[in-house]
Amino acid sequence: MARFRWHGRWAWLSGTGPFAVLAVAFAVVSTGFLYAALQPPSGLEWTGNAVKGSERDGIVYYSVHGKPYAVDDAYSFRSGSATVYVDPHDPTVAIIGKPASRWIDVATVLGPGAAAVACGVMGFRRKRSRRRAQRAVATLPREHLAGQGLDDQTMQELRDRQGLRPPVTEDQRWWRNHHVGEGA
């Protein structure tokens, strides 16, 4: 089976095996998750200004530059402090900070990102170890490379057996030449 080889400007990836493709795939997935995490309204957790607010019966009250605002915290009836992320250009646009949401965003972006880095590192380690092995084999004398699979006695027995075969007749040679590739 022939090995895939990178060519042209991508030749530096040769020898990394499937790890280069996996690294690119994980990087694309990570970038997609990053793009999704930065989209409004949840993107305010990363791009907005954090403001302390107080929650009473499902409504969080906060103020920006001394002006009071409120945002509804659906399905929450707790009271206490809360963090609100506010759009710096429009303080009326805000979301309530949820630590679980931030951790999920971090995990979905950094998980595939870390996998991309790990695949890249493994690919280049593979490339380096293969190059070292090729250099080690290239430094060996030729007599150390040939005939390492079978010992001399076995090779001699095989050669003797080949000499015991009856010669191919003219009819057999003609039949092989005229029926090659016919499935016979």
Image (tube, rainbow, N blue to C red):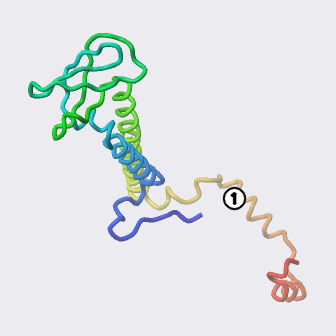
Residue 104 against residue 13 in the figure, above or below:
above
Q: Amino acid at mark 1?
A: Met
Label 1, secondary structure: give it: helix
The residue most toward the top is: 79
Residue 83: image location, x then y, percent: 25, 22
Mark 1: few/some/many CA within 10 Å (<14, 14-19, 20+): few
> Looking at the image, which is closer to me, 70 or 160?
70
Residue at coordinates 71% horizontally, 54% vertically from top-left?
154
Residue 158 against residue 45 in the figure, above or below:
below
Q: Which residue is mark 1?
A: 155
What count of labels does the image hold?
1
The residue most toward the right is: 171
Residue 139: image location, x then y, percent: 38, 57
The residue most toward the left is: 65
Left or right of residue 82, residue 142 in this image:
right
Residue at coordinates 65% horizontally, 53% vertically from top-left?
150
Image quadrant where one finds the C terminus: bottom right
Q: Quadrant of residue 92?
A: top left
Residue at coordinates 27% horizontally, 18% vertically from top-left?
82
Image quadrant where one finds the N terminus: bottom right
Q: Quadrant of residue 138?
A: bottom left
Left or right of residue 169, residue 55 in this image:
left
